[in-house]
Image (cartoon, grey):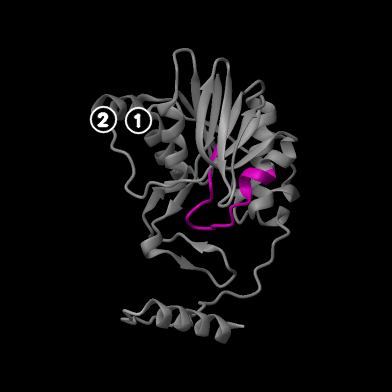
Amino acid sequence: MRFVVAIKQVPDTENMAMNDDGTVDRTGVRPVMDPYSEYALRRILESKRDGDTVSVVTMGPPQAESVLRRCVALGADSACLLSDPAFAGADVWATARVLASYMQKFECGYDCMVFGRMSSDGETGQLPFEVAGLLDVEQHAYVTDLRRDGDSMISVQDYGDVVRECSVGAGAVIAFAGVDPNGTFMDVPGFLASLESNIVTKNRVDLGLGLYSVGSKGSPTSIRRIGTVGSTRRNRKVLIKDPRRAADLVLGELEAME
């Protein structure tokens, strides 16, 4: 099977700041691999069988090549960087258009495209499904397990109150629900292989996209305001030995919320 895993390089969220126009200020901030992306990649690499191939792709500036080399060090077979100055300032829609164009032109015949649930810098959680919409393929959200069933796959999706198992059609988009904030250690052979790996680069022209369909020019999203929402939750600790009094307290709190 051919797996394509979408990876994102993000600024270290501990030091992340925003520009006045609502975009992420990456100046002087250490770039890291998004933990949701890394979790998705690790899950696919763990299920890899003989004959399978795992390629990774990311859209970003030239320095995003470093996260692709990390992916190769962890076990990915090939990597592609989608990089062009025109891609700067892209919202989710413009990013989805770039990724979908790449898949249509350079990954024909793939079996499954894999994403993390969201990215730690944007946190919209929309990208996998906008790509699926542009590709007109199945989309599987909140995936907790992806297992092999002969030559096909079955996804397990956890919607909170419902857990669903369903077969995965060819070319489907998968979004894993989990995240591993601790990351994965590279071994020495993998690290050395990543240094020699050929990272392919594609730009806007390679993808056949117009100047006004990508980046900030192709982004319909407008950020009007950014602010911090304060918490109004009251934290109370009450020691009650009588269950009836405890029930009365809970009911009183619920009535006060109505």
**Which residue is found at the position 40% from the left and 60% from the top?**
13
Mark 2 sits on what residue? Answer: 187
Which is more toward the observer, 164 or 102? 164
Q: Residue 134, image x and y in percent?
A: 74, 40
On the image, the x and y values in percent for residue 210 come to 75, 43
- Say which residue label 1 marks: 73
| Residue type, numbered disc 1 | Ala
Q: Is residue 97 visible?
A: yes
Instruction: Kindly state the secondary structure of the residue where label 2 is placed.
Output: loop
Residue 51: x, y in percent? 48, 13
Label 1, secondary structure: give it: helix
Q: Quadrant of residue 2?
A: top right
Q: Splitting the image into 4 quarters, where does residue 106 fall? A: top right
Say if residue 34 shows up in the picture. no
**Residue occupying the point 51% across, 62% down:** 24
Position of the C terminus by quadrant:
bottom right
**85 horizontally vs 178: left or right:** right
At label 2, which amino acid type do we have? Asp
Q: 253 above or below 66? A: below
